[in-house]
Amino acid sequence: MAIRVSGKFRKGKSGLVHRTNKWDIMIYAFMAFFVIVCVYPFWYVLIGSFSDGNDYMRGGVYLWPRLVSLQNYAVALVDSRLWIGFRVTFLRTVIGTVTNVLFTAMVAYAMSRDNLPFRPLIYWFNMFTMFFGGGLIPFYLVLKQLKLINTFWVYIIPGLYSVYNMIICSNYFRSIPGELHESAVMDGASEFRIFRSLYLPLSTPVLATIALWVGVGHWNAFYDSMVYTTSRDLQTLQLYLYKMIKTSEFVSTADMGGLPSNIQQNITATTVRYATIVISTVPILCIYPFLQRFLAKGIMLGSLKG
Amino acid sequence: MIKTLGVRKKNRRRFNWQIFLMAMAGVLFLAIFAYVPMFGIVIAFKDLDYTMNVMADLQSKPFVGLDNFIKFIQDAQFKTVMTNTLMLGVLELVITFPIPIFFALLLNEIRNNFGRRLVQTCTYFPHFISWVVFGGIVTAFLSTDGGFINSALMGLGLIRSPVQFLSNADYFYAIVIISSVIKGTGWGSVVYVAAIAGVDQEIYDAARVDGANRLQMALRVTLPCIAPTITVLLLLAISGILGSGFDRIYMLQNPLNLTRSEVLDTYIYKVGISQRRFSFTTAVGVFRSIVAVILLEAGNITSKKLTGNGLF
């Protein structure tokens, strides 16, 4: 038996090192293929956005722009709705993320304490909402009664709290040694003070995870903008993109108002669309290294004690 | 140690107002944004379609029983909507759900750290892109007017004229499922990668001593060890079978593929917001919620019987 083991594994610098065999090659080949499938669509759009519109439409641009042009970006950036969308989305992402994380963490702190009265009851009050809801119309009517429809706050207030994130956050709080809490109590700190000055700073990994999670959600949201607002000044970036993409695809049926008519008739509509897609994706790309690190870590934190 | 325990016990017994208020903030939020809408379900049992003032009519109009539910079941669209929703849900469960598990197992076989990190970075990325953008890219790829797929197929000589991928309803399921696999597989595997990292190394060592090869170790050691994680996620996926993901469907939908692309999510949006059929839409929503709860409960009971662990 020992001989068989040493046949499969040879001793290397760091203990057992695996020898590459045909299975490894197949796995690598498959992974390489899947990586290309995941990345190429974005590359395709990126090179399209830097291509001269008329030249691009002749086809055959797959790996590198044939005739480089920045004209698409010039046209895309002129549209004031892009900037309105950017502003609305940026504001909702920043305000929405900060308020959501603080509020959710506060509730999570209370839920993580053993001395919370009626804890099991409050827990089920929370859990039930994850599995059952009233649906679109009753929710819409509540927002209407609260005079939130067609205001910026419709993006923030209904998204203030998330039960799922509360549970993850609460699990993390529970992993913080209770002795810390006790010593803070001995020092005369109030519960809110302990939450703010002790638990919040100690929980940056999980808070960052939730913040990035919520932030990406805000950045990518378009359903709420479409359903709860009608004003053009409240249109999010994604809703603008939606209208822009759909308008040039199915001009006769999609709601118009995405683009000025001179661009609609222009042959470069496709490449301008690509440019707009790239512009809207750049912020995600910038924070992607953080996203990947924190979010992957955060999932592990959450699953620690599901 | 005994002393600290004593302090803890005393603390636990004392009613703490601050803690209570902090929890109540969450309760108040849910009361307004989750429980009040639940009571709004009464709308489904009255006839408030097309009304201008729902709140006033909610008081004055009589109950109509299950009329709105019957209207939905008899609606010409019912069969289409339910078929599409269920078909996409089942395909999702059979195809999109297991792929990240296998992907995580394969990822675990990559011994090269740099290579693994690279694969993760590239495959997680599409998850963070909105469906509006991703759907736009899919549309561009499938375009009959110089789209990548059509150009490639014609270049290879497999087809003579461009295929109308998005205007032909028959392709819709495949397009949605394939694009979801591309968008979600990498990120979907994160949970499993985390679970695999938690598997005790000694089990692998023991299996290795017993002469297990890599395939056997993956199937007989790793897979059973991450089974509880799979069960939990499967149960959640089953309860979400009627939620097709509004964004992706709405993004890829067009009037020509409606026979295969109209699902409950998009239908509710259209009859509720565009057509203002408030009671009818609420009834559809209630129908959907009830089916989801039944599916979750059924899945939970089955899983408890079979594997001994469930969600609750």
Image (spheres, helix red, strand yellow):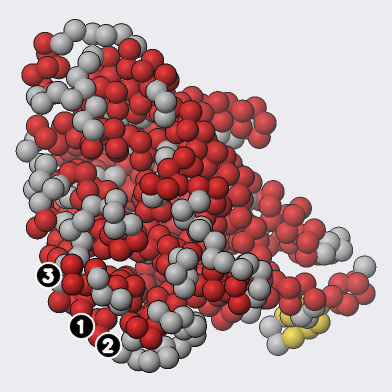
What's the residue at 23%, 36% (across, down)? B273
Tag shown at residue A74: 1
Tell which subunit mark 1 falls on: A
Tell which subunit mark 3 falls on: A
Q: Is residue B57 left or right of residue B240?
A: left
Q: Is residue B238 above or below residue A209?
A: above
Which of marks 1 and 3 precedes in the sequence?
1
Q: Give the spatial CA distance, label 3 vs label 1.
A: 12 Å
Q: Is residue A297 visible?
A: no
What's the residue at 41%, 88% (across, down)? A65
Asked if labels 2 and 3 share a chain, the reply is: yes
What's the residue at 66%, 73% (across, down)? B157
Q: Give the spatial CA distance, label 2 vs label 1.
A: 7 Å
Question: Are the residues at dot 2 and dot 1 in contact (C-beta closer than 8 Å)?
Answer: yes
**Foreground of the two, A195 or A240:** A240
Q: Is residue B286 above or below residue B10?
A: above
Relative image position of residue A118 (x, y in whole percent): 28, 27
Asked if labels 3 and 1 share a chain, the reply is: yes
Q: Secondary structure at mark 1?
A: helix
Which of marks 3 and 2 precedes in the sequence?
2
Asked if labels 2 and 1 share a chain, the reply is: yes
Please, what is the three-letter code of the amino acid marked with disc 3? Ser
Number of residues whose C-alpha sits closer than 10 Å to that of mark 2, classed few (under 14), some (14–19) or many (20 or more) = some
Please, what is the three-letter code of the amino acid marked with disc 1? Ala
Give the residue number, with chain letter if any, for mark 2.
A70
Give the residue number, with chain letter if any, for mark 3.
A80
Q: Is residue B4 above or below residue B43?
A: below
Number of residues whose C-alpha sits closer than 10 Å to that of mark 3, classed few (under 14), some (14–19) or many (20 or more) = few
**Foreground of the two, B271 or A155:** B271
**Foreground of the two, B166 or B201:** B166
Q: Is residue B274 above or below residue B162?
A: above
